[in-house]
Amino acid sequence: MNTSLLGYPRIGEKREWKKALEDHWAGNLSAEDLHAEMKKIRLNHLKKQQDAGIEYIPVGDFTYYDHILDAATMFGFIPERFTYEGGKVPLDTYFAMARGNKDVHASEMTKWYNTNYHYIVPEIGNTTPSLKENYLLEAYKEAREELGIEGKPVVIGPYSFLKLAKHYESEAFPELLEQLTNVYTQLFTELADAGVQWVQVDEPSLVTTIPEEDLTLVAKAYETLQKEVPQLNLLLQTYFDAVSHYEKVIQLPVAGFGLDFVHDQGKNLHALQTHGFPEDKVLAAGIIDGRNIWKAKLRDKRVLLQEIQIVVDEDNVWLQPSASLLHTPVTVENEPDLDETLKRALSFADEKMEELITLHNLAAGESEANAKILEDNEQIFADLKTKGWRKEEPDNSAFQEVSRPLSYEERREKQLEKWPLPTLPTTTIGSFPQTRDVRRLRARYKKGELSQEEYQSAIQSHIRTWIEHQEDIGLDVLVHGEFERNDMVEFFGERLEGFAFTKHAWVQSYGSRGVKPPIIYGDVRFKEPMTVEETVYAQSLTDKPVKGMLTGPVTILNWSFERDDLPKQQVAFQIAEAIKEEVSALEEAGIEMIQIDEPALREGLPLKREDWQTYLDWAVHAFRLSSSHVKNTTQIHTHMCYSEFQDIITTISALDADVISIETSRSQGDILETFEDNVYDKGIGLGVYDIHSPRVPSEDEMLHILHRALNVLPADLFWVNPDCGLKTRGEEETIAALKKMVNAAQKARAEITG
Ligand SMILES: Nc1nc2c(c(=O)[nH]1)N[C@@H](CNc1ccc(C(=O)N[C@@H](CCC(=O)N[C@@H](CCC(=O)N[C@@H](CCC(=O)O)C(=O)O)C(=O)O)C(=O)O)cc1)CN2
Ligand code: MET
Ligand SMILES: [Zn+2]
């Protein structure tokens, strides 16, 4: 048996990676120094894996931004709007594709399957792919030369690459796949010539619901690769769920398959037992949870492994995490403040490597040492139970629908009366720039360098400044700006019972941006109002309505590390009850427009269609549980971003929010088609500019988006807003962009009202 990793976090133990990138973008670190720093980080990560004793160490998973963008540039998919003269893509062009710059807009960014990681969507356009560089080869050589590591290059497979890409007609898929396969042939030939033994080819799209015919195309691609580069061992890697069409997949002509035995609802093991596994192939068994942070229950894992070994010869088994460790933080070591009992139950990337080795040793057979390991491991979970954090909860999986007393149409009349807003009201999504100052303020308060009063008054001064800005800009519905929040989920996690939060447990979300997901370890309960003070303060400064700003239960759950001892929905309902109390507290304090953000609702959608309805039903219920009890005149808003919404529009409507704002700007209006069929009949704001880029959009661009939107959506239901919160932007560009947005709205308004 061997051990292997699928990928390692890039971010660095203390976010060294992020700092280097941001210094470079700010002009404080030359390209040369950036390369040197990146190399240092990269080698350090490889060394850690080597020292841990991992046999198959991934190379080429490291990136300067996103690994899908790396593949796209390697294959020459550089959209025409970027300067590019052939050969290896220049660093500035690479970053411009990811982030945009003052002249060009970035490529679209979207969720990586069901995770909170975002990838840059490759744009196919008219490009015929060709190999522009071979970074896998460079990574492989570097690991060998510098550390004597026989690395395993990792690359997204051709099928998934095209599934993740956009800007091509679906009829072109077979031909594109063929073209791309030829480029992979060249890529793999170069790797094989350099001595590479194994390549991990990620095909996560094979776990999604796909038509069986696709397998014919996939087979053709892999047959070509097998024929052209027979000397190379390809490991076809899947993760995040059970592989679809198992029987067909395992017939593909590759040297091994990687399967996820953690997040597959037992389906991969079942398929293995039912249909067997090819004798001469490697099974890379994803046994340690690559998505969550709990230590493995070793006895259960050993049983799982034994069941696998009944089907697959132990010599052909690789032990690995269920997915790349990209989705876990780096190490528990740097968390001195966590409760000891809890901390002992946690395992981040570095600890997961140790777990693999332990499991490997356990598999060697019975021994006194092994018995002790199992016993100690069981004690960890026994201790968790004795803490009183987890009470026996009644099973509430069968739930009764809750609704607002009046229909949307009936509420709308009352709300129109209560809120005299112009046609096409303008607003923002909640957060304003989290400047260095704001972050430092929070950091100093956390360190105890500022008293509660000093901190509060500094936050109030930011709120005051931004209420003034918003009034100057001429926005219609204001927000307090979220200056007191480090993150929209972590903030609530810090204030609710049942959550633990960390100091350094960062996980990459997109580019250099990270999150510290809080850890749900016990029953979630409301303790005391969390947002009332700042919101009421903001409202006291203006006559315009200030929206209260909350994060919804589904998003809090999806962006936290979850308990694995309760059904997800039960935890969602606990959180919903807590948010419900916060909604009431805001309402009682006179805040009667309340936004409950659910940006993670779509990403939580299971990867297989057959599992969708169950999830959507409880997700909708959780949202309604937190928002249905309000007065008829209280206006509930919600917000979603960075996802494809087309296929869940009925669910979005079922949330029964009075107003929803959704992101559309980077996908250039794809979603508009959905609305042509009048599927949505409540208040709606489609983001009119992309907030993830430093570029200030022109008034005309926004007006253009508005016109297109108003072609399909009724003007009296339409709101004008950016596509997400503005926390990542600078102050000046934010004010400039919002002024243009308000001007654009005024023009559109004048066109409508004459
Ligand atoms: N959880 C979550 N997921 C999400 C989103 C989101 O908002 N939250 N938005 C979507 C896009 N994803 C995003 C994810 C992160 C960020 C983001 O801005 N992250 C910040 C960190 C935010 C944060 O938690 N900040 C803390 C800690 C800040 C910090 O680094 N402090 C310094 C000290 C301060 C200083 O002197 O500069 C330190 O600890 O070293 C705070 O502000 O309090 C970053 O990576 O830079 C934005 C969008 C989808 N997924
Ligand atoms: C990722 S959705 C963000 C919503 C939040 N209210 C904000 O403006 O930052
Ligand atoms: Zn958003």
Image (tube, rainbow, N blue to C red):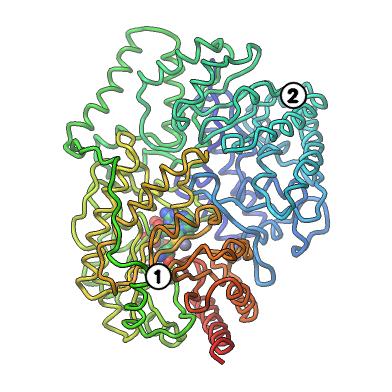
Cβ of mark 1 under 8 Å from ligand 1: the answer is no
- Give the image location of residue 232, x and y in percent: 74, 24
- Give the image location of residue 347, x and y in percent: 38, 34
Q: Is residue 534 left or right of residue 559?
A: left
Residue designated by label 1: 437
Q: Secondary structure at mark 1?
A: helix
Q: Is residue 206 left or right of residue 378?
A: right
Name the residue nearer the viewer: 523 or 615: 615
Q: Amino acid at mark 2?
A: Leu
The residue located at (45%, 10%) in the rendering is 364
Residue designated by label 2: 232
- Give the image location of residue 596, x and y in percent: 36, 63
Q: Is the residue 456 above or below the residue 282 in the image?
A: below
Q: Is residue 627 left or right of residue 466?
A: left
The residue located at (49%, 65%) in the rendering is 680
- Quadrant for the C terminus in the image: bottom right
Q: Residues within 10 Å of mark 1 (few under 14, many from 20)?
A: few
